[in-house]
Image (cartoon, coloured by chain):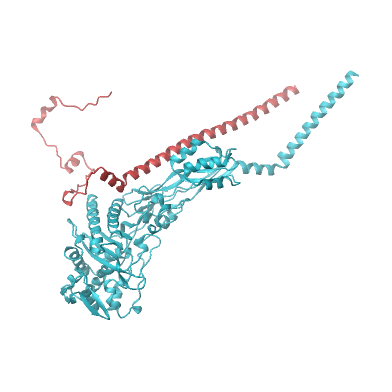
């Protein structure tokens, strides 16, 4: 009896275990074999991730291979709202450190998401402070940030990038396709805390880092130009100012600066008026600096000789229902003296011997109807009418720089014609593109567009423009150690009603140095300086200082 | 005999399974270790980049000028007359050629023959 009961119990226990095990095996079979695909997919989605590896944006160098723009890694703060315990306290703590509105952070932490940005690309101090808080659900991630060691320098040339390192302005935009590079990817397994496991990486496509740019800009000359322009801009309370320093032989832009300017490392807080590159985005009536083109055309066509004399009407000439004035009254002057003293009346009398068609021809040849082709975005071309739309009084305005418009860049190219033996060159700002190993990928060789005037006329014009600085209106541009040539300009701006203003002017100076063998040409344009507004008083001193220091600097480099 | 075989088989399978699990655990540990070291390396490289950026920033002409101005150091570019262009050295050829190219030539000196007998000053560096 006893043994029978024991036997029954034994069988019952055995059956229980056999059935249980069978159930487990069946369940295991169901999960591991029949439902394998389904669960494998879920697990794979949780463990296997493919991460995009952003490329490093290319560096921008100046002509001496000094860094102008580079990327460094910085920390970005993000959060997993599902892991954050006390949203309000967390928001308050982060707000105090990161200087972000507490309400904004709180709103982000309240979202039903596993990832939200708190603040991107923070300073190392901010990052360290956030890390020290050790808040659950708040993490730090590395991101590449574009930085500019020189801050304000060449801000309009270099331009900016957005948070994702995509070019927005300037060279960053124009050469974005070279600079940006290509993303790579990494397929790997991650743990429960989303940490990638190095030993479980099964696919790695390395990112292709962006190419670097080597500019024609020289950091030192850029600094000289910016410093001198800045001094003048503040001294004369100007609305805006631009300067271009160019090598007339190659079209290389050695410096380009505008005021107001902004800090590239903090561009989000810049005022609107500081954004545009005035040297290529703004056009204006050039005024007397345009007499360089008029005089070149007159001499090239042999319409007048330098020694030919004209009566300058003692500063007031009634012609075509207009009264033309000179800045200072003059009597009889030679054509050379007319340009040196910037007489409007004398210039118009000489230009009348040239004729409208030939005047128009040279405006075209000097490139005032075309973009210069500089490799910067947003270049405009002045609004200039074709000869068919010239009025009866156009020939009493255009030769002295009215009824025509130009950009500072076009003026730089035009004055370079005199400096470069009569050739109009295409300006360039990028010399070459380098791959990450430093090999040259692409070069942008200098190119001449056309021959505009003969060498004979060039020699004459250099003499005339030297005279402007030696004895004429541009005495303040005279440089002690070098012979320089140039032309002053003071253009009246047009009031909204269409009349010329007597209060708002554009002061300018265009020139080159040394006269014997020019290696730099400079354009200085100042928008609405006051109380002094003459080009010879406002822009010429800037030209003088920039030329003086730049030539001495180039001499130390053995260039001149 | 059968029991022995079965037991040995079970032990073998268990051993292999444990070895596999151990290997996976080690791999994960190794991943964390590599991850940590990579993080340190990344931090150091980032620091190097930041330092490089700081050097560039400190060397920028505008900053140098401001620093010099604040210290009232007045410097200017040299005048043209003060700049001397140096001829490039020709490094090919013998040592004598090189000396000649920079204009310093060793000439024969009869009275210099017994020079080796006299004591000569030697530069010494004392290490502490």
Task: Quarter of the image for the C terminus of chain A: give it.
Answer: bottom left
- Chain for colour cyan: A
Q: Residue at x 14, y 24 (%)?
A: B119
Task: Quarter of the image for the N terminus of chain A: give it.
Answer: top right
Whether residue A140 is visible, yes or no, is no
Horizontal and vertical percent for residue A254? 30, 56
Of all residues, the one furthest to the right in this rendering is A1
Compared across the picture, whether A33 is left or right of A462 comes to: right
Compared across the picture, whether A173 is left or right of A307 comes to: right
Q: Residue at x 23, y 65 (%)?
A: A487
Horizontal and vertical percent for residue A539? 26, 61
A139 up-or-down from A550: above or below: above
In the image, A391 versus B116, the foreground residue is A391
Shade representing chain B: red
Whether residue A512 is visible, yes or no, is yes
Horizontal and vertical percent for residue A407? 33, 65
Q: Residue at x 14, y 39 (%)?
A: B105
Q: Quadrant of residue A397?
A: bottom left
Horizontal and vertical percent for residue B41? 45, 37
In the image, A250 versus A190, the foreground residue is A190
In the image, A352 versus A305, the foreground residue is A352
Count up the numbered dots: 0
Compared across the picture, whether A26 is left or right of A296 comes to: right
């Amino acid at each position: 009896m006893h043994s029978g009961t024991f036997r029954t119990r034994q069988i019952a226990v055995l059956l229980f275990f056999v059935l249980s095990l069978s159930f487990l095996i069946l369940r295991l079979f169901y999960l591991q074999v029949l439902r394998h695909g389904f669960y494998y997919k879920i697990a794979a989605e949780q463990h296997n991730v493919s991460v995009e590896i952003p490329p490093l944006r290319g560096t921008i160098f100046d002509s001496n291979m000094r860094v102008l723009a580079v990327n460094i890694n910085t920390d970005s703060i993000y959060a997993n709202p599902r892991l954050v315990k006390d949203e309000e306290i967390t928001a308050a703590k982060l707000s105090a450190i990161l200087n972000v509105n507490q309400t904004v952070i709180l709103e982000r932490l309240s979202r039903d998401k596993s990832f939200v940005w708190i603040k991107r690309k923070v300073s190392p101090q901010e990052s360290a402070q956030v890390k020290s808080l050790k808040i659950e659900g708040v993490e730090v991630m590395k991101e590449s940030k574009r930085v500019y060691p020189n801050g304000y320098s060449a801000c309009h040339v270099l331009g900016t990038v957005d948070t994702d390192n995509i070019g927005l302005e300037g060279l960053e935009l124009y050469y974005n396709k070279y600079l940006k590079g290509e993303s790579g990817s990494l397929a790997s397994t991650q743990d429960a805390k989303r940490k990638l496991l190095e030993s479980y990486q099964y696919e790695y496509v390395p990112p292709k880092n962006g190419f670097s740019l080597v500019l024609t800009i020289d950091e030192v000359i850029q600094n000289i130009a910016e410093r001198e322009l800045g001094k003048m801009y503040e001294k004369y309370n100007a609305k805006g100012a631009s300067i271009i320093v160019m090598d007339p032989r190659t079209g290389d832009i050695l410096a380009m600066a505008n005021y107001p300017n902004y800090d590239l490392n903090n561009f989000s807080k810049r005022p609107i008026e500081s954004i545009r590159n005035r040297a290529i985005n703004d056009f204006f009536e050039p005024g007397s600096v345009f007499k360089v083109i008029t005089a070149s055309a007159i001499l090239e066509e042999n319409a007048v000789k330098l020694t030919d004399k004209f009566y300058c009407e003692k500063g007031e000439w009634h012609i075509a229902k207009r009264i033309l004035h000179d800045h200072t009254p003059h009597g009889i002057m030679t054509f050379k003296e007319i340009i040196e003293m910037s007489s409007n009346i004398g210039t118009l009398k000489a230009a009348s011997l040239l004729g409208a068609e030939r005047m128009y021809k040279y405006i075209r040849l000097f490139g005032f109807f075309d973009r210069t082709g500089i490799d910067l975005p947003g270049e405009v071309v002045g609004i200039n009418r074709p000869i068919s739309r010239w009025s009866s009084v156009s020939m009493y305005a255009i030769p002295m720089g009215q009824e025509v418009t130009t950009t500072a860049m076009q003026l730089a190219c035009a004055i370079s014609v005199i400096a470069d033996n009569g050739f109009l060159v295409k300006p360039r700002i990028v010399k070459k593109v380098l791959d990450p190993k430093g090999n040259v990928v692409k070069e942008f060789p200098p190119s001449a567009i056309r021959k505009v005037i003969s060498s004979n006329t060039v020699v004459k014009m250099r003499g005339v423009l030297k005279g402007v600085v030696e004895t004429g209106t541009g005495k303040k541009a005279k440089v002690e150690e070098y012979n320089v040539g140039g032309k002053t300009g003071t253009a009246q701006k047009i009031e909204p009603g269409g009349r010329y203003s007597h209060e708002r002017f554009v002061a300018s100076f265009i020139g080159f140095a040394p006269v014997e063998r020019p290696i730099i040409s400079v354009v200085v344009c100042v928008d609405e300086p006051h109380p002094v507004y003459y080009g010879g008083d406002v822009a010429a001193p800037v030209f003088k200082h920039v030329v003086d220091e730049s030539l001495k600097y180039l001499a130390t480099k053995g260039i001149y | 005999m059968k029991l022995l075989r079965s037991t040995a088989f079970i032990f073998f399978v268990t051993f292999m399974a444990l070895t596999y699990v151990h290997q996976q655990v080690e791999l994960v540990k190794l991943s964390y270790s590599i991850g940590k070291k990579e993080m340190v390396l990344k931090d150091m490289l980032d620091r190097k980049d930041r330092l490089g950026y700081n050097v560039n920033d400190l060397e920028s002409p505008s900053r140098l000028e401001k620093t010099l101005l604040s210290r009232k150091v007045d410097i200017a570019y040299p005048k043209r007359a003060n700049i001397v262009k140096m001829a490039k050295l020709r490094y090919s050829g013998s040592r004598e050629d090189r000396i000649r190219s920079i204009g310093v030539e060793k000439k024969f000196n009869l009275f210099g023959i017994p020079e080796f007998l006299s004591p000569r000053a030697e530069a010494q560096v004392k290490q502490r």
